[in-house]
Amino acid sequence: MDFFAWLRPLEWVVANIMVIWHQIWEFLGLDPASGVTWALSIVGLVVTIRAALIPLFVKQIKASRAMQMIAPDLKKVQDKYKGKKDQASREAMSRETMELYSKHKTNPFSSCLPMLVQAPIFFALFRVLNYRLEGNGTGEQGGGIGLLTDELAQQAQDATLFGAKLSDSFLEAGSPLSAKILSAVLIIAMVATTFLTQRQLTRKNMPAAALTGPMAQQQKILMYALPFIFVITGPNFPVGVLIYWTTTNLWTMGQQFYVIRNNPTPGSEAERQHKERIAAKEAKRAARRGEDPSTMVIEQAPVEEPKRSGQRQQPKRKNRGGSKPPAAPSTDDQNKDSE
C-alpha cells in the first residue's frame, strides 16, 4: 500500500498548474524545452497558490497581531498561577487563557495555518519532481499525470537550469557540480529569506510590551529554528523544490512588508514610521495647495498668556456680606486729621 496515495490528487493539481504556466510562457515566446521556462512554471505555481491563500494570510496576520497584543495578559495569567500544580489551579489557568483567546478571537495555531496548508502542496511538488520527472516511481507513481503527459515529463526531465536539472539535489549521488552550486545558492537564499521574514514580523511589527515574555521567546526561537531546519533538510530537496520554497519565501516577505507598512500593529515601531509617513504626505499636500505647513502649525498653536509683572498681585477678597467695601479716605480728610 502506498502511504502517499492521499497526495495523488494534489500531485494532479500541482502538475496541471505547472503545465498551464508552461503553456503561457511558451505562448509568450520562451523555449518550451528550456530549464528557465520550467523554472518560471514553478514560480507561476507559487503565484497561483499564494494568491489563493491570501484570505488565509490575512487571517494569519490578524491572529499573529492578536497574539502579540494579548502577550502581556497571558504573562499575567501565567504569573498568577506560577508554582501552583494542583488540578484546580491548572484548570483555572487553562480557562482564563481560553477566555483571552475567545475575547480576542485568536489562538496559537491560526498563525501557522498558511504554512500547514502549504505543507501538502510542498510534498506533492516534491513527488512530481522526484517521481514524475525523474522516473523514480513505479506504476502510478511514475510517468505523466493530468496535463503533464509522458512527453512533457520527459521534456521537463531533460531541461537544465545553469547546467542543473530540476530534479537534481545537493546530496544526490552523481549530481553534477553545477547542481550542487545552484542548490547551495538556493538553500542560502531560502534560509536568508526565512530569517528576514521572521525578524521583520517580530522586531518591527511588535509593540514594546510584546517583546518580553514567553510569546516573545517562542517567536525568537522560531526565528532561529526555522532557518536551521532548512539548512539540515535543504540539501535533500530537488532544485525545483528549492526554487518553489525560495519564491514562496520572497512572496511572504513582500506580502508581509506591505501589510506591516500600511496596517501596522498599534504601539509598534512600524506604527510610528507609518504615522511619520502620513504626516509627511499631509505636508506635501498642503504645499501643493499653496499652504505653508509651518504657518498652519503656528495658527493651531495655543494662545500664550500675557506676561505678568515682577510684583505679585494680591488676591482679591470676596465680600461675603454683600455690602460695598469702605472707600479709602480722601486727601482732604487726611489734611483735616493732621490739623
Image (cartoon, rainbow, N blue to C red):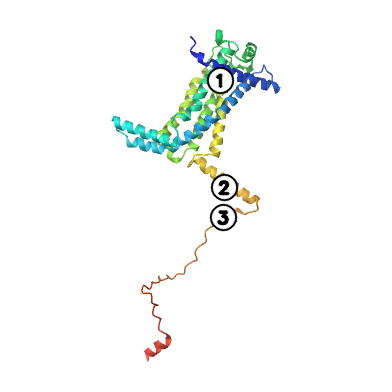
Which of marks 1 and 3 precedes in the sequence?
1
74 and 283: which one is in front? 74
Callout 3 touching callout 1 (CB < 8 Å): no
Residue 194: where, in percent of width, then height? 51, 28
Left or right relative to 339: residue 241: right
Q: Amino acid at mark 2?
A: Ala
Q: Residues within 10 Å of mark 3 (few under 14, many from 20)?
A: few
Q: Residue furthest front?
A: 322
Q: Which residue is mark 1?
A: 241
Q: Place residue 28 in its image quadrant.
A: top right
Q: Amino acid at mark 3?
A: Val
Callout 1: helix, strand or loop?
helix
Callout 2: helix, strand or loop?
helix
Residue 303 vertical placement versus 241 (above, below): below
Left or right relative to 97: residue 226: right
Residue 4: where, in percent of width, then height? 50, 14
Q: Place residue 16 in its image quadrant.
A: top right
Marks 1/2: CA–CA distance? 44 Å
Residue 122: where, in percent of width, then height? 53, 21
Which of marks 2 and 1 precedes in the sequence?
1
Q: Residues within 10 Å of mark 2 (few under 14, many from 20)?
A: few
Q: Residues within 10 Å of mark 1 (few under 14, many from 20)?
A: many
Left or right relative to 271: residue 312: left
319 and 121: which one is in front? 319
Q: Which residue is mark 2?
A: 279
Residue 249: where, in percent of width, then height? 55, 27
Which of marks 2 and 3 precedes in the sequence?
2
Residue 267 vertical placement versus 256 (above, below): below
Marks 3/2: CA–CA distance? 12 Å
Q: Is residue 196 visible?
A: no
Q: Which residue is mark 3?
A: 297
**Residue at position x 50%, y 23% in the image:** 230
